[in-house]
Image (tube, rainbow, N blue to C red):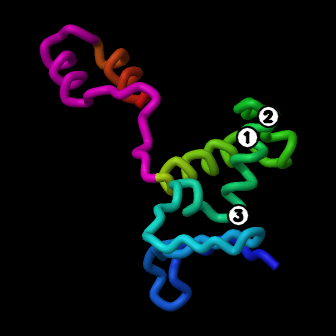
Amino acid sequence: MSYPVITNCPVCSKTLKITKLHCAHCHTTIENEFELTKLASLTQEQLYFIEVFLACRGNIKEVEKELSISYPTVRGKLNDIISALGYEQKKKNDVDEKKIIAMLEAGEITSEEAIKLLKEE
């Protein structure tokens, strides 16, 4: 009987290392330190979400229908997975607040334009 690979120690919660691989067919055993992929650190729920997301070809509306969840929930789950994989969240529009304020102070843009730019973050 096979069990899913656990990635964290059940005692101290630190990351486990895989040190042994074994072939059930020919009984070859290989011992060394093996690295897991980033995906191996995800929960079963996150992996299921990724499967659904890929099956829907990244179409968020289809994921909503398939999982019966709202658009914000889909986005939240995607953001959680991105963070779990070690990637930083990117803003939609990487706006430099200091630059906007400087443009406002210099009279290059109006206060309404500055507010609009800041809200796009």
Task: Considering the whole magenta stretch, tell me its main secondary structure.
Answer: loop
From mark 3 to mark 1, how far is it between C-alphas?
14 Å
Give the residue pinned by disc 2: 56
The C terminus sits in image quarter? top left
Give the residue pinned by disc 1: 53
The numbered disc on residue 4 is: none
The numbered disc on residue 44 is: 3
Q: How many marks?
A: 3
In this image, 32 relative to 23: left or right?
left
- Residue plotted at (75% across, 30% down): 57
Disc 2 marks a residue whose amino acid type is Cys
Mark 2 falls on what kind of element? Answer: loop
- Residue farthest along the top direction in this orientation: 108
Picture quadrant where residue 118 is located = top left
Tell me, yes or no, whether the two marked residues, 1 and 2, touch with CB atoms within 8 Å. yes
From mark 1 to mark 2, how far is it between C-alphas?
5 Å
Q: Position of residue 45 (x, y in %)?
A: 71, 61
